[in-house]
Image (cartoon, helix red, strand yellow):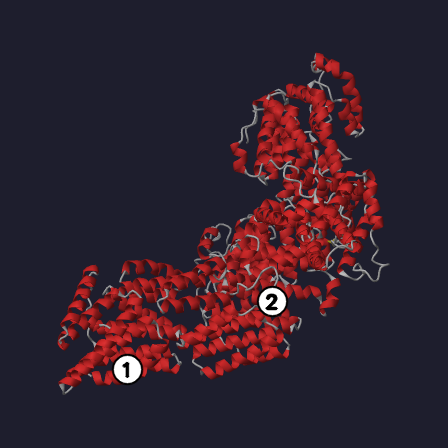
Amino acid sequence: MASVHESLYFNPMMTNGVVHANVFGVKDWVTPYKITVLMLLDEMTISTSITLLDRRRLNKLILPLLQSPDMTLSQLIKTVEDSCPQLAYTVHLRLQLMADGELKDMEHFFDMLPSPFNETESEAHKTSVVGLFMRHMVLAYNKLSFSQVYKLYTALQQYYQSYERKDSPTAEPAEDTDMELTNTEELGGKMEKEELDLEPSDDEVSTRGPLSQKQAEYFLAQQAYLLKNDENKALDPAALQKELNNMLKFNPDFAEAHYLSYLNSMRVQDIFNSTDSLLHYFDRLILPGGDSKSNGDEGCGRSLRYAALNLAALHCRFGHYQQAELALQEAIRIAQESNDHVCLQHCLSWLYLLEQMKGSDSTLTEHAVKMAVHFCLPYLASLGIQSLVQQGAVGGKTANKLMDALKDTDLLHWKHSLSELIDISIAQKTAIWRMYGKSTMALQQAQVLLSMNSLEPVNLGVQQNNSEAFAVALCHLSELHAEQGLFAAASEILKHLRERFPPHSQHAKLWMLCDQKIQFDRAMNDGKYHMADSLVMGIAALSKTEGLYRKALVLKARNQTTEAYKVLQRLLLYCEKIKGTEMTIRVMLSLAELHWSSSCHAVALPLLLRSLAVSREYHLQYLASECILHLAFSQLMLGIPEQALNILHMAIEPILAHGALLDKGRAMLLVAKCQIVTASSEPSKQQKTQALEVAVQNLEEAGTYFTKVDCKERVRDIYYLQARLYHSLGKTAERNKCAMLFRQHNQELPSQGVPLITRL
Amino acid sequence: MAALSSQFGDLVEIKKQLTVIIALCRERGLMHSVKWASELAFALDPLPMNELPPPPPFTEEDAQDLDAYSLAKSFFDLKEYDRAAYFLRGCRSQKAYFLYMYSRYLSGEKKKDDETVDSLGPLEKGQVKNESLRELRVELSKKHKARELDGFGLYLYGVVLRKLDLLKEAIDVFVEATHCLPLHWGAWLELCNLVENKEMLKSMSFPDTWMKDFFLAHIYTEMQMIEEALQKYQSLINVGFSKSTYIISQIAVAYHNIRDIDKALSMFNELREQDPYRIENMDTFSNLLYVRTMKPELSYLAHNLCDIDKYRVETCCVIGNYYSLRSQHEKAALYFQRALKLNPRCLGAWTLMGHEYMEMKNTSAAIQAYRHAIEVNKRDYRAWYGLGQTYEILKMPFYCLYYYRRAHQLRPNDSRMLVALGECYEKLNQLVEATKCYWRAYSVGDVERMALVKLAKLHEQLNESDQAAQCYVIYIKEIFECGELMEQVELSTAFRYLGQYYFKNKQYDDASICAQRCCNYNDAREEGKSLLRQISQVRGQGETSSSDLSLPFIFGPLSAKNTPVRRMSPLNLSSVTP
């Protein structure tokens, strides 16, 4: 029966019901790979013929070799060859001798290893990295039992033989030093190719054999770092999970692996596994007594608090706000009971975040920030300030105060090297400038963030990280480019975003929305309303208000006025409720446009004035100029073009400086229209001609703007106007040319219900 | 009644078959199957001399291999597997071939176990493999393709496949083995471990023999389909296996699983009588004794088992339970640890150790122990439940919800998890969810009889007085039906509430009955009296009581025929507590 042969093993590491993996300090043990590394180190100390340059390269190699997972011999030898071919050959030779020899060769090798304790001068000093490694190895070797020693030796032989087998069909590179020296380049190239071939196969990862505790720790740290900073460089979720499962199978007490598994599951939005791993991690973490001394308070309670807090964070990430709130309440209660102000402060910032996500307007008080400073939590403090700034920006605080506050936090960040918050701060500045309608400043800030070197130590080839701040900045950048009609550049940026934040990742929604918005705008400009309509669904899935607004725009463009009006009214109410100022103003403008289409220009005026007042109150310069444009148009239609021209002068400057191409075009067109109307009332004929010529020029300018953003309908209308003007100026050739162009465009385009003359 | 195979009519034939298979298994060193078959054979009447089956046919090949086989078998019995395999190399008879392969397999397993202790590091432990498995698989699969394997060979092939984690193939081979040699219990038992759910079981075809009924009963027990299992076992007993200790123990375990403690205890007592030196399943027995706090019996059992063999997992668990009952939790934990040292995959011990640490208020150690239990078996609901309790004690009701939910998933019809879930929701002030949990707990058959009272109190809090009254009425009825008058506190609160409720609804007769009942309890006496006074006052004012809803008491002379409980059937309630 099967139960007879169930494996019976006794776990010596269990005391008091709790398994301690490290009761005997078994962190590391001898493997064939490590013996080879030991040989390498030994050779390095003995050999005198290594040049200084080679030695430097080798020294740089040592740490990765000690920390990385076990490599196969061919990999190892190739790595060493890169630095010093001669040494690689010697090591290979020594290993060959040992593997082909007898057990006593290995025993002899360990006897002959330079003892770190005697040689105070050498690199293998007892406290150095190398010395420590050697001591670990010697200790581990001496602990081996009789059968284990033999097992190790057979493992060594296999290790060497598998290399031989793999190498024998190829041109045995290690046989001849001379040949190798001449062929280094070719070999190097070959090796790189081979390595590239080897890297991505995950079979390689899983067949590498068990990791020692140290290697496992290093692996986890590395992967966690990559997950945080450059997700794409980390192993892909499936492979990483496989590796972690492997690790946990052999050592279930490796709690950190559970945490990484939690992070990994979050990448693929797997709530079930991530909850399981998170709770498992904290179950494992809750250790008695031992840890409490270092923490200063009772260790168990501490991890409990943070367990609840992390659970809240998890639910928050998955959008389960009610659950998150319950978990958070629990964390707060436990923290309060044990007077843990630091934890409480963390809870407070989460609470604030949660309230914000739920859409209710809670305010993080300045008091909270002060408390954070008091408890020396610079991270939380400046995070708090940033939240306050955001609130202030949305709430219409003056720009100088906001920028001042941001400057203060920047000081804090640089002082404490909080690179993450520096990124956020810059991204925030970008967003604020953009909101104010200063596209140049926004552009500049975005560029600053992108070209800034991260403060994190530059290793593993990670230059920049993949935080939300980067996503935000890049999205702004692409939108700004699209506004200026540089669609190729915008799509290039979006392509980069797609690579850096793959669709399953956390911040992918940002660029998805941005991408669809740009496409929508293009479709609208081009008059392809069916395309725009199909995009509305996608936008609505990502952002409800935005989707509704765009839907109204499509309806309006299709002259379904009643439906559009209904949607806009609903949206207006909603936006006023959630205090979305920008959207409110946009909606009011759209409503005003609806009034125009039913020729109620007078009705539109109070709406426009109200939106102008609001946008001035909140310093939204861009929207303010938009309002003025609308106002001017209304006035034009109401027959007071002089007044319209007057107020247009206020708006034209900021629009030309910061506005999108489309807006520039519209502004110029409006100016031209006003000029034409006023020209008719000019007394002298000469003055009239002059005014009309200026208008033609302005139309020309507007035309170039519209061409750049593919606004064919508007271009057509410009041609029409130009033709009429040239006609009244008596310039027949120009007139005919414009008329012909108009005809060409008109044939291409279906005629719309709204004549463009009566449109802004 | 589950239909049994028709072959049960002929017990003599069954007995003969058992005798044959015992001999065959013994020749091949399959000791557990021998044990099982012998136990069963022992339960049947002995055969007369002339009915004894003839020894299995002796072929030419057998004769050739006889000497090598005898030598090897003696080595095999002495656990010198390599030596046995060496002398069996060239043998061609089926018997010798099986023993040859089996010794190679066991030798690999033994070496693997030895290696595990001696491996280079903890992370390498999982990597230790039975090196011979691969070769065995290749050889056996060749034979399998050539159809040269007999029932035992197929069994061994299946075991090898299972050890190599090729579960699908293993299941197919085991099914084939049962068709080829239905009498070999080992193959059936392997299937029990491999079949995961009902659907899988239904999709498989088994030989139509009497063994199949034993198999089905066993697997029903494993799958917690206790009703079906009990039916099967009962019919097996009826057929004539009433003396089988195997069946008795299985029935006892089944009763234990559905928490029918009295029946389980009586079964175990019967088992102890018939087989006093039995150690298997005694840990389950001790659990039952523990639940019933039968100290002297548990103490006797512990001492008895300790006399028989103190280095058995079961013995250690029993002693642990014994100490736990005596509130010597440190010692109890020690014994559970010892059990784990004897077999680290012993799941019950991890969970029990967790309980002990809970008693000692060592929550972190308890959590660790429970986690280990879950690692061994993810489906251990007691460990999940224990984890939940631990966090509940640490006052983290939201956090423990997850654990209770897991436990509930595993045992959807266990009221304890539901009550625990309800309590957590109550603490989180999510009363609607809590009512759902309590109602469900009541519907699946509440063990502790607390769900209804809690539900009633919740309805009180939610100001749903009708539902609250209904719950109390059902509660009181259930308590009186059982004839248990232990939970007086809750009864008095129920009467108190009902009295007030009827009084408010102007059903003075019922109110006064409730008030009178209240007077029977110390803590509600005063209120009962004052209520009675109020009632008499109101009646004094000349109002005639309109009692269209009279009280549901089985004991009162008034209401013997007219119990509104029937009208307020649980179905009514379900509409208000969705």
Q: Which disc is residue A677 wearing?
A: none
Residue A573 placed where, x, y %? 34, 72
- Report whether A412 appears left or right of A562: right
Q: Provide residue A166's location: percent of width, then percent of height.
A: 65, 39
On what subunit does the disc labeled 2 rest?
A: A
Residue A707 versus residue B533: which sits nearer the camera?
A707
Element assignment for label 2 = loop
What amino acid does circle 2 point to?
Glu
Residue A522 percent across, percent down from the top left: 32, 63
Quarter of image, res B402? bottom right
Q: CA distance from mark 2 to mark 1?
A: 49 Å
Read off the residue under disc 1: A648
Tag 1 subunit: A
Q: Quadrant of the N terminus of chain B?
A: top right
Q: Is residue A139 above or below residue B426?
A: above
Residue denoted by label 2: A456
Query: Is residue B326 visible in this depiction of the protein?
Result: no
> Where B347 falls versus A484 (above or below)?
above
Residue A654 shows in the view: yes
Q: Residues within 10 Å of mark 2 (few under 14, many from 20)?
A: some
Q: Is residue B149 above or below residue A313?
A: above
- Say which residue appears at 65% left-offset and 42% top-offset: B256
What element does badge 1 sit on? helix
